[in-house]
Image (spheres, rainbow, N blue to C red):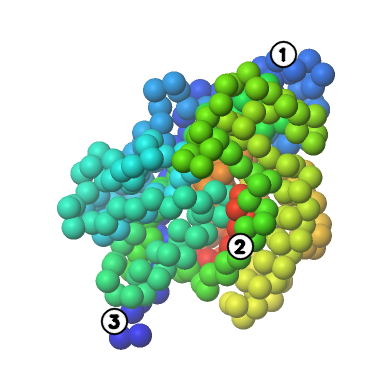
Protein backbone atom coordinates (compact mmCIF):
# COMPACT_ATOMS: atom_id res chain seq x y z
CA UNK A 1 0.00 0.00 0.00
CA UNK A 2 1.53 3.36 -1.03
CA UNK A 3 2.49 5.43 2.02
CA UNK A 4 1.80 2.59 4.46
CA UNK A 5 4.13 1.65 7.30
CA UNK A 6 4.44 -0.97 10.00
CA UNK A 7 3.28 -0.31 13.55
CA UNK A 8 5.42 -0.60 16.67
CA UNK A 9 4.77 -0.50 20.41
CA UNK A 10 7.23 2.14 21.52
CA UNK A 11 6.31 2.45 25.21
CA UNK A 12 4.02 1.08 27.93
CA UNK A 13 3.14 2.51 31.32
CA UNK A 14 0.41 1.65 33.78
CA UNK A 15 -1.38 3.03 36.81
CA UNK A 16 -2.75 1.11 39.79
CA UNK A 17 -5.07 2.91 42.23
CA UNK A 18 -3.96 3.05 45.85
CA UNK A 19 -7.01 1.23 47.26
CA UNK A 20 -6.55 -2.48 47.93
CA UNK A 21 -8.51 -5.63 48.71
CA UNK A 22 -6.27 -8.22 50.33
CA UNK A 23 -6.75 -11.93 50.88
CA UNK A 24 -6.86 -11.25 54.61
CA UNK A 25 -9.83 -8.91 54.10
CA UNK A 26 -11.59 -11.45 51.89
CA UNK A 27 -11.00 -14.22 54.41
CA UNK A 28 -12.43 -12.00 57.15
CA UNK A 29 -15.57 -11.37 55.05
CA UNK A 30 -15.84 -15.04 53.99
CA UNK A 31 -14.43 -17.18 56.84
CA UNK A 32 -14.89 -20.39 54.85
CA UNK A 33 -12.08 -19.17 52.59
CA UNK A 34 -8.65 -19.10 54.17
CA UNK A 35 -5.90 -16.79 52.93
CA UNK A 36 -4.01 -19.80 51.60
CA UNK A 37 -7.03 -21.21 49.80
CA UNK A 38 -7.66 -17.92 47.99
CA UNK A 39 -4.02 -17.65 46.94
CA UNK A 40 -3.87 -21.23 45.71
CA UNK A 41 -7.10 -20.86 43.75
CA UNK A 42 -6.52 -17.57 41.92
CA UNK A 43 -2.84 -16.67 42.43
CA UNK A 44 -3.71 -13.17 43.65
CA UNK A 45 -2.83 -11.68 47.03
CA UNK A 46 -3.93 -8.06 46.46
CA UNK A 47 -6.41 -6.45 44.09
CA UNK A 48 -6.11 -2.71 43.43
CA UNK A 49 -9.41 -0.89 43.93
CA UNK A 50 -10.37 2.58 42.64
CA UNK A 51 -11.49 5.13 45.22
CA UNK A 52 -15.08 6.33 45.53
CA UNK A 53 -14.29 9.43 43.46
CA UNK A 54 -11.91 7.70 41.08
CA UNK A 55 -13.36 6.62 37.75
CA UNK A 56 -12.20 5.19 34.44
CA UNK A 57 -11.17 8.57 33.01
CA UNK A 58 -9.11 9.33 36.14
CA UNK A 59 -7.18 6.07 35.87
CA UNK A 60 -6.72 6.60 32.13
CA UNK A 61 -5.34 10.11 32.55
CA UNK A 62 -2.95 8.95 35.27
CA UNK A 63 -1.61 6.12 33.08
CA UNK A 64 -1.20 8.38 30.03
CA UNK A 65 0.60 11.11 32.00
CA UNK A 66 2.94 8.49 33.41
CA UNK A 67 3.61 7.22 29.87
CA UNK A 68 4.48 10.71 28.63
CA UNK A 69 6.70 11.45 31.64
CA UNK A 70 8.51 8.09 31.83
CA UNK A 71 9.29 8.01 28.12
CA UNK A 72 9.71 11.72 27.36
CA UNK A 73 6.88 11.63 24.81
CA UNK A 74 5.12 14.96 24.13
CA UNK A 75 1.33 14.64 24.37
CA UNK A 76 1.16 16.70 21.17
CA UNK A 77 2.56 13.71 19.22
CA UNK A 78 -0.75 11.84 19.61
CA UNK A 79 -2.76 11.65 16.38
CA UNK A 80 -5.39 9.22 17.63
CA UNK A 81 -6.59 8.37 21.14
CA UNK A 82 -8.27 5.02 21.61
CA UNK A 83 -9.75 4.15 25.02
CA UNK A 84 -10.72 0.55 25.67
CA UNK A 85 -13.17 0.27 28.58
CA UNK A 86 -16.33 -1.50 29.70
CA UNK A 87 -16.87 0.88 32.60
CA UNK A 88 -17.22 4.31 30.94
CA UNK A 89 -17.79 7.47 32.97
CA UNK A 90 -21.06 8.12 31.07
CA UNK A 91 -23.26 6.54 28.41
CA UNK A 92 -22.24 9.56 26.33
CA UNK A 93 -20.03 11.35 25.49
CA UNK A 94 -17.22 8.88 24.89
CA UNK A 95 -14.91 8.75 27.89
CA UNK A 96 -12.05 9.16 25.40
CA UNK A 97 -13.23 12.72 24.74
CA UNK A 98 -12.95 13.53 28.45
CA UNK A 99 -9.46 12.05 28.57
CA UNK A 100 -8.49 13.91 25.37
CA UNK A 101 -9.37 17.24 27.00
CA UNK A 102 -7.62 16.50 30.29
CA UNK A 103 -4.44 15.44 28.50
CA UNK A 104 -4.47 18.60 26.38
CA UNK A 105 -4.29 16.72 23.09
CA UNK A 106 -4.53 18.55 19.79
CA UNK A 107 -8.02 19.26 18.42
CA UNK A 108 -6.89 17.45 15.27
CA UNK A 109 -6.43 14.21 17.23
CA UNK A 110 -9.29 11.70 17.10
CA UNK A 111 -10.71 10.15 20.30
CA UNK A 112 -12.94 7.07 20.48
CA UNK A 113 -14.03 4.42 22.98
CA UNK A 114 -13.88 0.67 22.38
CA UNK A 115 -16.29 -1.40 24.46
CA UNK A 116 -14.22 -4.55 24.81
CA UNK A 117 -12.96 -6.60 27.73
CA UNK A 118 -10.32 -9.28 28.15
CA UNK A 119 -9.33 -9.25 24.45
CA UNK A 120 -9.57 -5.45 24.26
CA UNK A 121 -5.86 -4.72 24.23
CA UNK A 122 -5.32 -6.99 21.23
CA UNK A 123 -8.30 -5.50 19.42
CA UNK A 124 -6.96 -2.02 20.13
CA UNK A 125 -3.48 -2.67 18.79
CA UNK A 126 -5.04 -4.35 15.75
CA UNK A 127 -7.03 -1.20 15.01
CA UNK A 128 -3.95 0.94 15.61
CA UNK A 129 -1.97 -1.23 13.22
CA UNK A 130 -4.57 -0.66 10.51
CA UNK A 131 -4.72 3.10 11.09
CA UNK A 132 -0.96 3.41 10.85
CA UNK A 133 -0.80 1.17 7.78
CA UNK A 134 -3.37 3.41 6.06
CA UNK A 135 -0.94 6.31 6.20
CA UNK A 136 -3.58 8.57 7.75
CA UNK A 137 -2.19 8.29 11.29
CA UNK A 138 1.36 8.16 12.62
CA UNK A 139 0.96 7.82 16.39
CA UNK A 140 -1.82 6.12 18.38
CA UNK A 141 -2.26 6.40 22.13
CA UNK A 142 -4.09 3.25 23.24
CA UNK A 143 -5.37 3.32 26.82
CA UNK A 144 -7.02 0.38 28.55
CA UNK A 145 -8.91 1.36 31.70
CA UNK A 146 -11.54 -0.39 33.81
CA UNK A 147 -13.09 -0.18 37.26
CA UNK A 148 -14.69 -3.62 37.38
CA UNK A 149 -14.83 -3.46 41.18
CA UNK A 150 -17.96 -1.32 40.79
CA UNK A 151 -19.68 -4.22 39.04
CA UNK A 152 -19.09 -6.67 41.91
CA UNK A 153 -21.73 -7.43 44.51
CA UNK A 154 -20.35 -7.34 48.08
CA UNK A 155 -21.53 -10.94 48.63
CA UNK A 156 -19.88 -12.26 45.46
CA UNK A 157 -16.74 -13.81 46.92
CA UNK A 158 -15.79 -15.53 43.65
CA UNK A 159 -15.52 -12.45 41.46
CA UNK A 160 -14.26 -10.23 44.27
CA UNK A 161 -11.29 -12.58 44.66
CA UNK A 162 -10.35 -12.12 40.99
CA UNK A 163 -10.94 -8.63 39.61
CA UNK A 164 -9.00 -5.43 40.25
CA UNK A 165 -8.99 -1.91 38.79
CA UNK A 166 -6.19 -0.48 36.65
CA UNK A 167 -5.24 1.41 33.53
CA UNK A 168 -2.44 0.99 31.01
CA UNK A 169 -1.25 3.40 28.33
CA UNK A 170 0.56 2.23 25.20
CA UNK A 171 2.18 4.41 22.54
CA UNK A 172 1.95 2.82 19.10
CA UNK A 173 3.83 4.45 16.25
CA UNK A 174 4.84 4.08 12.65
CA UNK A 175 8.42 4.85 13.63
CA UNK A 176 10.73 1.78 13.70
CA UNK A 177 11.20 1.63 17.49
CA UNK A 178 10.19 -0.93 20.10
CA UNK A 179 8.13 -4.00 19.28
CA UNK A 180 6.85 -4.39 15.74
CA UNK A 181 3.28 -5.64 15.52
CA UNK A 182 2.78 -8.83 13.58
CA UNK A 183 -0.42 -10.02 11.95
CA UNK A 184 -3.41 -10.01 14.30
CA UNK A 185 -5.88 -12.88 14.63
CA UNK A 186 -9.42 -12.24 15.95
CA UNK A 187 -12.46 -14.31 16.86
CA UNK A 188 -15.96 -13.92 18.29
CA UNK A 189 -18.73 -16.22 19.51
CA UNK A 190 -21.66 -14.16 20.74
CA UNK A 191 -23.43 -17.27 22.03
CA UNK A 192 -21.24 -16.97 25.10
CA UNK A 193 -22.26 -13.39 25.90
CA UNK A 194 -24.62 -14.43 28.70
CA UNK A 195 -21.83 -16.23 30.58
CA UNK A 196 -19.95 -13.03 31.51
CA UNK A 197 -22.33 -10.11 31.72
CA UNK A 198 -23.68 -7.15 33.66
CA UNK A 199 -27.28 -7.68 32.55
CA UNK A 200 -28.98 -4.60 33.99
CA UNK A 201 -28.25 -0.90 33.74
CA UNK A 202 -28.32 -0.39 29.98
CA UNK A 203 -31.34 0.49 27.87
CA UNK A 204 -32.67 -3.06 27.41
CA UNK A 205 -32.88 -3.95 31.10
CA UNK A 206 -33.10 -1.22 33.77
CA UNK A 207 -31.61 -1.68 37.19
CA UNK A 208 -33.67 -3.47 39.84
CA UNK A 209 -33.51 -3.51 43.63
CA UNK A 210 -30.09 -4.59 44.93
CA UNK A 211 -31.65 -6.94 47.47
CA UNK A 212 -33.10 -9.24 44.76
CA UNK A 213 -30.46 -11.93 45.16
CA UNK A 214 -30.33 -15.37 43.58
CA UNK A 215 -27.63 -18.03 43.41
CA UNK A 216 -25.39 -18.64 40.43
CA UNK A 217 -24.51 -22.22 39.33
CA UNK A 218 -21.58 -22.21 41.76
CA UNK A 219 -23.76 -21.14 44.70
CA UNK A 220 -22.59 -17.53 44.90
CA UNK A 221 -25.21 -14.85 45.67
CA UNK A 222 -25.73 -12.63 42.64
CA UNK A 223 -27.91 -9.82 41.34
CA UNK A 224 -28.46 -8.80 37.72
CA UNK A 225 -27.27 -5.25 38.46
CA UNK A 226 -23.81 -6.72 39.03
CA UNK A 227 -21.28 -8.80 37.17
CA UNK A 228 -22.25 -12.41 36.59
CA UNK A 229 -19.65 -14.93 35.48
CA UNK A 230 -20.30 -18.59 34.83
CA UNK A 231 -16.84 -19.76 35.78
CA UNK A 232 -17.22 -23.29 34.43
CA UNK A 233 -18.39 -22.11 31.02
CA UNK A 234 -15.66 -19.47 30.78
CA UNK A 235 -13.08 -22.09 31.68
CA UNK A 236 -14.38 -24.51 29.04
CA UNK A 237 -14.46 -21.76 26.42
CA UNK A 238 -10.87 -20.81 27.19
CA UNK A 239 -9.68 -24.41 26.94
CA UNK A 240 -11.24 -24.66 23.48
CA UNK A 241 -10.42 -21.21 22.10
CA UNK A 242 -6.91 -20.46 23.35
CA UNK A 243 -4.95 -23.46 21.99
CA UNK A 244 -6.59 -22.91 18.59
CA UNK A 245 -5.83 -19.19 18.85
CA UNK A 246 -2.14 -19.83 19.51
CA UNK A 247 -1.94 -22.11 16.47
CA UNK A 248 -3.69 -19.49 14.31
CA UNK A 249 -1.33 -16.72 15.48
CA UNK A 250 1.73 -18.82 14.71
CA UNK A 251 0.40 -19.80 11.29
CA UNK A 252 -0.57 -16.22 10.40
CA UNK A 253 2.90 -14.98 11.34
CA UNK A 254 4.72 -17.95 9.74
CA UNK A 255 6.36 -19.00 12.99
CA UNK A 256 6.89 -22.21 14.94
CA UNK A 257 6.05 -22.36 18.63
CA UNK A 258 9.68 -22.94 19.58
CA UNK A 259 10.61 -19.61 17.94
CA UNK A 260 8.55 -17.66 20.50
CA UNK A 261 10.66 -16.32 23.37
CA UNK A 262 7.79 -15.37 25.68
CA UNK A 263 4.04 -15.99 25.88
CA UNK A 264 1.86 -13.40 27.61
CA UNK A 265 -1.77 -14.42 27.92
CA UNK A 266 -4.65 -12.47 29.45
CA UNK A 267 -4.11 -12.78 33.19
CA UNK A 268 -7.45 -14.38 34.07
CA UNK A 269 -6.39 -16.36 37.14
CA UNK A 270 -3.40 -18.55 37.92
CA UNK A 271 -5.31 -21.84 37.88
CA UNK A 272 -6.59 -21.21 34.35
CA UNK A 273 -3.22 -19.97 33.11
CA UNK A 274 -1.39 -22.99 34.49
CA UNK A 275 -3.91 -25.29 32.83
CA UNK A 276 -3.63 -23.49 29.48
CA UNK A 277 0.17 -23.47 29.61
CA UNK A 278 0.23 -27.23 30.06
CA UNK A 279 -2.37 -27.82 27.37
CA UNK A 280 -0.52 -25.68 24.82
CA UNK A 281 2.78 -27.30 25.97
CA UNK A 282 4.63 -24.09 26.79
CA UNK A 283 7.75 -24.27 28.94
CA UNK A 284 7.26 -22.44 32.30
CA UNK A 285 10.28 -20.19 31.71
CA UNK A 286 8.70 -18.88 28.49
CA UNK A 287 5.30 -18.22 30.06
CA UNK A 288 4.83 -14.98 32.00
CA UNK A 289 2.35 -14.47 34.84
CA UNK A 290 1.94 -11.18 36.66
CA UNK A 291 -1.25 -10.62 38.65
CA UNK A 292 -0.45 -11.40 42.27
CA UNK A 293 -0.30 -7.77 43.35
CA UNK A 294 -3.00 -6.26 41.12
CA UNK A 295 -5.58 -8.94 40.22
CA UNK A 296 -7.31 -9.56 36.90
CA UNK A 297 -7.47 -6.04 35.45
CA UNK A 298 -9.46 -7.06 32.34
CA UNK A 299 -8.19 -5.19 29.24
CA UNK A 300 -5.06 -4.00 31.07
CA UNK A 301 -3.67 -7.40 32.07
CA UNK A 302 -1.53 -7.96 28.96
CA UNK A 303 0.13 -4.51 28.78
CA UNK A 304 0.78 -4.54 32.55
CA UNK A 305 2.37 -8.00 32.29
CA UNK A 306 4.40 -6.93 29.24
CA UNK A 307 5.73 -3.88 31.07
CA UNK A 308 6.74 -6.02 34.03
CA UNK A 309 8.33 -8.64 31.76
CA UNK A 310 10.42 -5.89 30.16
CA UNK A 311 11.48 -4.60 33.59
CA UNK A 312 12.52 -8.14 34.62
CA UNK A 313 14.51 -8.66 31.41
CA UNK A 314 12.14 -11.31 30.06
CA UNK A 315 11.56 -9.10 27.00
CA UNK A 316 14.63 -7.60 25.39
CA UNK A 317 15.80 -6.56 21.93
CA UNK A 318 15.37 -9.50 19.57
CA UNK A 319 12.55 -11.12 21.55
CA UNK A 320 9.48 -12.53 19.84
CA UNK A 321 6.49 -12.23 22.19
CA UNK A 322 3.14 -13.91 21.54
CA UNK A 323 0.19 -12.23 23.25
CA UNK A 324 -3.33 -13.67 23.51
CA UNK A 325 -6.48 -12.10 24.94
CA UNK A 326 -9.73 -13.99 25.51
CA UNK A 327 -12.94 -13.70 27.51
CA UNK A 328 -16.07 -11.56 27.70
CA UNK A 329 -18.11 -11.66 24.51
CA UNK A 330 -16.95 -14.35 23.86
CA UNK A 331 -14.08 -12.72 22.04
CA UNK A 332 -10.44 -13.55 21.51
CA UNK A 333 -7.43 -12.25 19.64
CA UNK A 334 -3.67 -12.35 19.50
CA UNK A 335 -0.51 -11.44 17.66
CA UNK A 336 3.28 -11.58 17.82
CA UNK A 337 5.47 -8.63 18.79
CA UNK A 338 8.98 -8.47 17.35
CA UNK A 339 11.29 -6.51 19.65
> Where does the image place residue 338, in percent across and percent down from the top left?
52, 69
Q: Is residue 39 visible?
A: no
Q: Is residue 42 left or right of residue 307?
A: right
Q: Answer few, some or many: residues within 10 Å of disc 3's Cα (few below 14, many 20 plus, some between 14 and 19).
A: few
For label 1, the crowd category at 10 Å Cα-Cα, with few meaning under 14, some 14 to 19 and many 20 or more, is few
Residue sitting farthest toward the left: 107
Vertical side of 258 occupied by 275: above or below: above
The numbered mark, 1 or 3, whose residue comes first in the sequence reads: 3
| Residue 31 versus residue 106 in the image, above or below | above
Indicate which disc, 3 or 2, sits on the residue closer to the N terminus.
Answer: 3
The residue lying toward the viewer, choosing from 219 and 84, is 219
Q: At x 40% / y 71%, what residue is drawn?
A: 130
Please indicate, yes or no, whether residue 51 appears anywhere in the rendered image. Answer: yes
**What's the CA distance linking mark 1 and mark 3?**
60 Å
Question: Considering the numbered disc 1 on the image, is that residue within a helix, a strand or a loop?
Answer: helix
Estimate the spatial distance between the alpha carbons at disc 1 and disc 2, rounded to whole Å. Answer: 39 Å
State which tag comes first along the sequence, 1 or 2. 1
Give the total number of marks visible in the rendering: 3
Q: Are marks 3 and 2 in contact (CB under 8 Å)?
A: no
Label 3: which secondary element: loop
As drawn, the label of residue 188 is 2
Judge left or right: residue 284 versus residue 315: right
The residue beneath circle 1 is 28
Q: Which residue is mark 3?
A: 3
78, 136: nearer the viewer:
136
Amino acid sequence: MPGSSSAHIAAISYYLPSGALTNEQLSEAFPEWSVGKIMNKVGISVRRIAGKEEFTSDLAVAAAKRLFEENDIPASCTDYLMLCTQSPDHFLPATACLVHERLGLSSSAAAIDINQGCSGFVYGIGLARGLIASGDVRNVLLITSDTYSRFLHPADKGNRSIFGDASAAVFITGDPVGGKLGKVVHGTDGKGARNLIVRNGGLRFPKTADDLLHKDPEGNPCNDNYLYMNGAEIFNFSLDAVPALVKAILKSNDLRQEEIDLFVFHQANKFMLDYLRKKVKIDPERFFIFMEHCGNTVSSTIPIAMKQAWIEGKIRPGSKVLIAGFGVGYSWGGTVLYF
